[in-house]
Image (cartoon, rainbow, N blue to C red):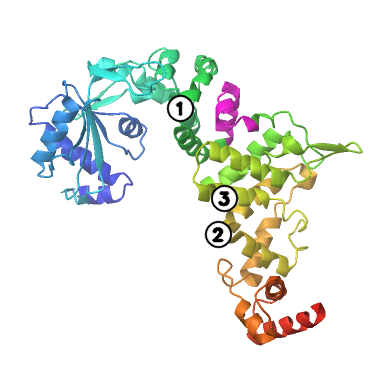
Amino acid sequence: MIGLRYLLKEGAKEQAAVELISSLVKDSPFKGKVFLTGGYVRDEFLGLDPKDIDIVVELPEGGIKFATWITKKLGIYRSGTNPVIFPRFGTAKFNLRGITHNGQDLSTIDIETVMTRKEKYTQGSRKPDVSPGTLAQDAERRDFTFNTLMKDLTTGEVIDLTGMGKADLKKGIVRTPLNPDIIFAEDPLRMLRAIRFTVKYGWKLPFFMIKALKNNAHLLNDISSERIQDELNKMLVTKSPDTAIRLLQITGLSKIVAPELDKLVGLQQNKYHKWDAMKHTLEVLKNTPPILIARLAALFHDVGKYKTKNVVDNEVHFYEHEDIGAEVARDIMKRLKYPNDLVDAVYTIIKNHMRLKGAGVEGDVVSDKALRRLQADLGDHLESTLDVIHSDNISHADMHVMPQQIPNIRSRLKTVGLPKPQHITLPIDGNDVMQTLGVKPGKIVGDLLKFVEDAYFENPKLTRLDALKIVKDRYKEMK
């Protein structure tokens, strides 16, 4: 029955690993000295499947000593590689490759161990000087009260050394164990983590925490772009990405993360919208599926509007905002060190998010040919683009929403779309054109193939003979 229970839970491997470690600790020199901490204890307390096993050992050099002892105990010790030791910080990391427990293969489980410690940061450095400390001192150095809880692997008791962790978890409050100015100064990334936890779990961020975030926002300049990007990504795929962005702007953190978005606040739009550009953006973001590529495109889809606003005959226009916005989004993402393929994908989606505005409320005005060309142009990014367009369509003024356009277009694509939109192969190529007409390589060959491509989108069943006839007929017209 125990094995079945584990198989039914997402965190089965992690739980099996913890039970194994606990069983070994109880009759060992480390009895009463080994504690689970951080996210595992938090999620277990909340009734969620716990992951990310982090262990603190209440002994000088305890993390290193325990990792060495347990890998030898399990017969998986490998000098220099299992465990991997980081002597400066008194930490170690080991894996359970080749170990099974309660029917679970634990080979994918990695565990970090550390001694109870105190930390002292030097201004401008994110790497602290560490020294042995008590359990209480170890708890106080952590980011938030709910991450200070520790579970004794000998007794199974959850210890709340700050006296706030359990209560804050029950009430859903995000706050630091010490003065937030101290905690944020030690590692400013914790400010973004505060917002992420708030929106991930739907918790509350007290006023004094918001004030501290405002006062310390400038410290985020000391954090690498990659770390900022990682936290932003985690926020965007939560259930409330709009709340995350709103909190970034309220606290001033957005000035470091993406200041371009702040320029949309209060930017009034035209009759097609009922909100300013920023609130509209947040609504689109909220309505987009929780897929990173779509959420990023939604977040930046209208960022070009602050550069393109025009008033003509008392009418507001944002001509070519999709083109300018794609460029702005690319600049933001490159600054945050996003991978090039993701930058290119978001750029493509934003550039094309206005493409179906003339397709009609029901999506029936656009031709089959145009839909096939859309498929070919967007390739792997078609579905995410349609997701963003749909979210945009349902986030306009009540008289201008188009909830049925994209669902109907998706239905049409199932029947009239290209058979393999990501791999379009014309029935002839440039060599066929040159051999048929007796011409040399040059612009004319490419121009003639464009006529063939146009005919292909009109009729994907275009044959080789049909294509060659088009080439011959067009060539005669061009001579």
Most foreground residue, 255 or 296 = 255
Q: Residue at x 55, y 46 (%)?
A: 343
Residue 312 falls in which quadrant of the image?
top right
Q: Residue at x 53, y 39 (%)?
A: 236
Q: Nearer the viewer, mark 3 or mark 2?
A: 3
What separation in Å lies between label 2 and label 1 (alpha carbons)? 33 Å
Residue 251 to residue 329: above or below? above
What kind of element bears circle 3? helix
What kind of element bears circle 1? loop
Looking at marks 1 and 3 on the same chain, the residue that comes earlier in the sequence is marked by 1
Left or right, residue 277 beside residue 139: right
Q: Return the mark for residue 223.
A: 1
In this view, which residue lies farthest toward the right?
313
Q: Amino acid at mark 2?
A: Asp
Residue 169 falls in which quadrant of the image?
top left
Q: Residue at x 82, y 37 (%)?
A: 310
Q: Amino acid at mark 1?
A: Ile
User: Which region is colored magenta?
Assistant: 242-260
Question: How many numbered circles does the render carry?
Answer: 3
**For mark 2, does the 10 Å Cα neighbourhood hold few (<14), some (14 to 19), or many (20 or more) residues?**
few
**For mark 3, does the 10 Å Cα neighbourhood hold few (<14), some (14 to 19), or many (20 or more) residues?**
some
Residue 40 to residue 356: above or below? above
Give the main secondary structure of the magenta stretch: helix
* Mark 1 and mark 3 residues within 8 Å of each other at the beta carbon: no
Residue 124: x and y in percent read 41, 19
Residue assigned mark 3: 344
Most foreground residue, 41 or 293 = 293
What kind of element bears circle 2? helix
Q: Return the mark for residue 380.
A: 2
Looking at marks 3 and 2 on the same chain, the residue that comes earlier in the sequence is marked by 3
